Amino acid sequence: MRFPQSSLRNGETPPRTSNLPFHSTVSVQKLRRFNILILVFRLASFSFSLASAVFMITNSHGSDSPNWHDFDAFRFVLAANAIVAFYSLAEMGASIWEILKGTTLLPEIVQVWFDFGHDQVFAYLLLSADAAGTALSRTLRGGGGGGDTCTAVNSFCVQSDISVALGFAGFLFLGFSSLLSGFRLVCFIISGSRFLLYL
Amino acid sequence: MRFPQSSLRNGETPPRTSNLPFHSTVSVQKLRRFNILILVFRLASFSFSLASAVFMITNSHGSDSPNWHDFDAFRFVLAANAIVAFYSLAEMGASIWEILKGTTLLPEIVQVWFDFGHDQVFAYLLLSADAAGTALSRTLRGGGGGGDTCTAVNSFCVQSDISVALGFAGFLFLGFSSLLSGFRLVCFIISGSRFLLYL
């Protein structure tokens, strides 16, 4: 009696009987690449938000200059950017965990809903903060109704403009992350696992 | 030879052989209720945005008062609210068409993506406009850096505050519409038709 394996010559690989393990490996690789892409977006979002918050919090040029915490909208910009930077850092940790260990940090259903929900809410938060900051900046430059703050202390206005612009860049990458986590959520709802269907 | 129907007595309903038509009727009814809910949200969003735009455009109290079109942020509020009002009106038309005729106005796949995409973009647009309007209002009230416009002409500030608040209400209902159209999009992606799976 011969076993099927005994017909193989030396150095030959056994014939593949099912495509399932191969398919699964491809899925795992694609999920890994997808997670790395999310990680890159989170890193960009974290960097821009942190830079924006730092630019805003250091925005005081001596005692004769206005201070960022005198302005509601600038406080809002700082708070929103700090929240997004902290959230992006936490999500980066979760992404790295997932790439290394192959499982999500929280249970899978909680993780996908958590990611998408928070991405959406924080994107709205950051966009409204940046819009409010832009409106205040324009007012300070004398674009109607505002005083002549910027003609007196120009460096304050330039620095807050930079902070708001960095916040918009952070919003952009948070929006990309939100698209990807929304896609992952849809995949999870369809197939019951976060492994991707369409990539 | 007796036909199965002939065994029924007078007034008896024939026994149901398959659940398929029943299920389909329920689906149609649920889709109809869902569409009516969307229509209500669109109507609310339209009303609030239109009211906000009207409040803003009529916001000039004589020649000694400031005018809304002197302020960038208020122009942005007016434009965003007018766009959302127009979009909600068009979407209401599409909803009514769908409720009456049973088919979507555009091809189904175009319609679900169009609805969700525009809901998202216009929600971000409206929120950022309202945030900018709020920041300007607070500045005008003297919340740092701004002049004393509101102490001089209070009715102008009150009317622009009302306009911005109505804009936020419009954003709220647009957000609800966006949730529902997102749900419909996911149903469409899963099942290939807009008939609802989980309701």
Image (cartoon, coloured by chain):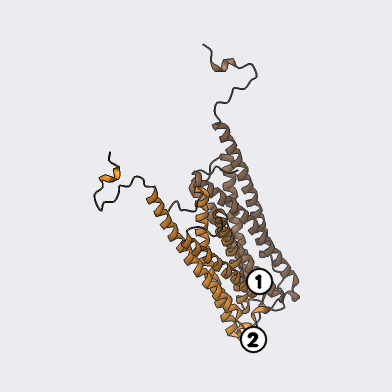
Chain colours: A orange, B brown
- The answer to whether B37 is drawn above or below residue A163 in the figure is above
Report the disc number at residue A65: 2
Q: Position of residue A35 (x, y in %)?
A: 47, 61
What amino acid is at disc 1? Ala
Same chain, marks 2 and 1? no
In what element is the residue under mark 1? helix
The quadrant of the picture occupied by the C terminus of chain A is: bottom left
User: In whole angstroms, how far apart are the C-alphas of marks 2 and 1?
Assistant: 21 Å
Residue at far top of view: B1
Q: Are marks 2 and 1 in contact (CB under 8 Å)?
A: no
Answer whether residue B106 is visible to the viewer in this image.
Answer: no
Residue plotted at (33% across, 47% down): A16
In what element is the residue under mark 2? loop
Residue plotted at (52% across, 58% down): A104
Q: Position of residue B17 (x, y in %)?
A: 55, 26
- The answer to whether A142 is drawn above or below residue A168 in the figure is below
Q: Quadrant of residue A129?
A: bottom right
Report the disc number at residue B135: 1
What amino acid is at disc 2? Ser
Q: Quadrant of residue A71?
A: bottom right
Q: Nearer the viewer, mark 2 or mark 1?
A: 2
Q: Chain of mark 1?
A: B
The quadrant of the picture occupied by the N terminus of chain A is: top left
In this rendered view, identify the residue nearer to me: A57 or B114: A57
- The answer to whether A91 is drawn above or below residue B85 in the figure is below
